[in-house]
Amino acid sequence: MKEELLKAVAQPMQVFFAPFRMSVANFTLNAMAMAVLLIIGYGTYIWVPIISTIFWHIILIVIGRREPHIDNIIASRSMVARVTKNIINEGGNKYGA
């Protein structure tokens, strides 16, 4: 019982076995591409975004299996990479309040 609880808490959210944020971004970008191709190509190239969605989702599944927390790692690195601005012009970054 304890093992099942730890597994449920420790595992990140997934959509069809891929990391959540990355797969939502994948579906969103390919849905936008599908809408553009529907407008421009009158439905003749509708299969291209569908194949692209499936291909990139399989890639995300492989990446998610190798590192289950890749989604959180990328999100935390993007938060750390932000440059803070100093109120008074000094050298370096200002940390803290």
Image (cartoon, rainbow, N blue to C red):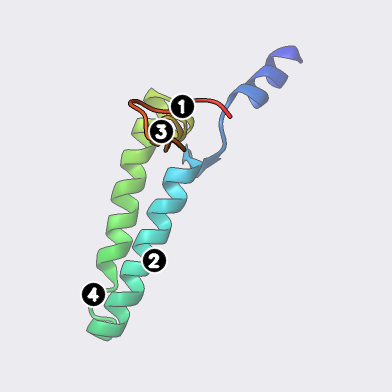
* Location of residue 77 in the rendering, given as x and y in whole percent from the top left corner: 41, 30
Q: What residue type is labelled 4?
A: Tyr
Q: Quadrant of the N terminus?
A: top right
Mark 1 or mark 4: name the one nearer the start of the chain.
Answer: 4
Q: How far apart are marks 2 and 1 (CA)?
A: 25 Å
In depth, the one of 93 and 13 nearer the eye is 93
- Mark 2 residue type: Ala
Badge 1 or badge 3: first in the primary sequence? 1
According to the picture, the residue beneath numbered tag 1 turns out to be 68
Mark 1 or mark 4, which is nearer to you? 1
The total of numbered circles placed on residues is 4
- Do the residues bearing badges 4 and 2 touch, measured as CB atoms within 8 Å? no
Q: Are marks 1 and 3 in contact (CB under 8 Å)?
A: no
Pointer 3 with pointer 4, Cβ within 8 A: no
**88 vs 94, nearest the viewer:** 88
Residue 4 point in image, percent of width and height: 69, 20
Decide which of tag 4 and tag 2 comes sooner along the chain.
Answer: 2
* C-alpha distance separating marks 4 and 2: 13 Å
Query: Of the residues tagged 3 and 4, which is closer to the observer?
Result: 3
> Which residue is at 29% across, 73% downward?
46
Indicate the position of residue 96 as horizontal and vertical percent values: 55, 26
Q: Distance between the residues labelled 2 and 3?
A: 23 Å
**Horizontal and vertical percent position of residue 42:** 27, 86
Circle nearer the viewer, 4 or 2: 2
Q: Name the residue under label 3.
A: 74
Q: Is residue 3 left or right of residue 62?
A: right
